[in-house]
Image (cartoon, rainbow, N blue to C red):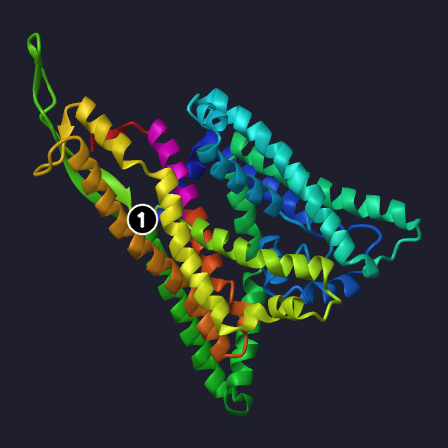
Amino acid sequence: MPGMLDTITNAWKSVEIRKKILFTLAMLVVYSIGKVIPVPGIDQVQFSSLLKQMGQLGQLMDIISGGALNQVSLFAMGITPYINSSIILQLLTVAIPALERLQKEGEQGRKKIQVITRYVTIGLALFQATAFWYATRSASASTLPPFLSAILIIASFTAGTAFIMWVGEKIDQFGVGNGISLIIFAGIVSRGPQIVQQLFVAITNWSYKGSLLLAIPLTLLAIAFSVGIVALVVFVSTAERRIPVQYAKRVVGRKQFGGQNTYLPIKVNSAGVLPVIFAMSLLSMPSTIVSFFFAGSNSAIATFFKNFANQPSYYVVYAFLILGFTFFYSMIQFNPVEIANNLQKNGGFIPGIRPGRPSSDFILRTSRRLNWFDAIFLMVIVMMPVLLGRLTSSSSTLWFGGTAILIVVGVALQTMKQMESQLLMRHYEGFLK
């Protein structure tokens, strides 16, 4: 904590970084204002009641949007289409050679992929806005003809998502931190007081006859538990496995190169929160289709998917999907063969391991062991708040708690690291100490 405060203090003293911080805060204020601008032609009360029928999917989207979905504002869909678009492009990069070549072209290729991501985002936003309108068309309160009312609502939702995407990119360009991540961060943090209040009410109701004397220590225990989870997430998010690497000595003319000892860092939580988001999105897809297009159906399949989120089997499948996506994400992002080849080209080797294939196998085995730990860690962080929610009969409040903590802590650490790197660029004396 003192190190974080020192980083913020030193960053504020720098005029250039201070301007970036103020610009970022200004953009987040603009985002907060947009969350309270209502979409014309929709009755908020009826829309909120329809939103509750979507179960955990509606709660997830409402939390990520910072409550904008429940208020039926212009930013109701939040940044979800952009997240899905980024995930789709990331997965297609492995499957489509043209996208893989763009990714390897450096900054120019990254800009082209970013343009493609924007177009895919608009397409997904149009589809999602249409689904929203179709699922909640009974909440229409417009005096316009149904056709024009539908165009107005769909265009409003889509424009809101496009504007949020623009805000995020401006933060990336002129501000501090990752713009999209900070928007999600702001949406989750803005719901913090409400979640704490709901937790206190749930614990009070769970206590014996609503005893306030018992509710207060239970609330303090829940807060202490949350602080412990945050500390654990910070520890694992910053932890890394350091594989020792030694470089052979080379003599070029009268100079000697190499011979130093260093290490190859492999992050423990290399996938971050993405396996949880992937698993949640995949599990939510059938419920989304049923909630949007078959809400009034009483068929066995529709009933099964409507109630699937409340069954114990849901969390078992959820845990296995997190495990699978953790290994899948590591497989597409981490290439031990390329790392071993780069070490060999630069005269480096792992002590006790022969260069080439044995080194890549050793790095792969080490990475796989870390993947097991990472997957189990993510499952524990996600499932513990669910169990606490079941215990206090407030699962609707706490089921997203673990994921929210992973996102908030990850964004905070990422922003602090970026600020520290910018400070190092302006204070060279830090390298001499």
Q: Residue under label 1, please give it.
A: 238
Q: Is residue 74 visible from the viewing direction of this image?
A: no
Label 1 environment density (alpha carbons within 10 Å; few <14, some 14–19, many ≥20)? few
Q: How many marks?
A: 1
Percent across and percent down for residue 116 are 58, 30
Q: Within the image, what quadrant is residue 233 found in?
A: bottom left
Percent across and percent down for residue 123 are 67, 38
Left or right? Give the position of 289 relative to 335.
right
**Residue 318 in magenta?**
no
Q: Within the image, what quadrant is residue 67 found in?
A: bottom right
Left or right? Give the position of 295 relative to 61.
right
Which residue ends up furthest to the front in the rendered image? 300
Q: Which residues are magenta?
A: 413-426
Left or right? Give the position of 405 relative to 58.
left
Front-lying residue, 176 or 364: 364
Give the position of the C terminus as an image quadrant.
Answer: top left
Q: Is residue 242 visible from the viewing direction of this image?
A: yes
Q: Secondary structure at mark 1?
A: helix
Front-lying residue, 408 or 386: 386
Q: Is residue 255 above or below residue 122?
A: above
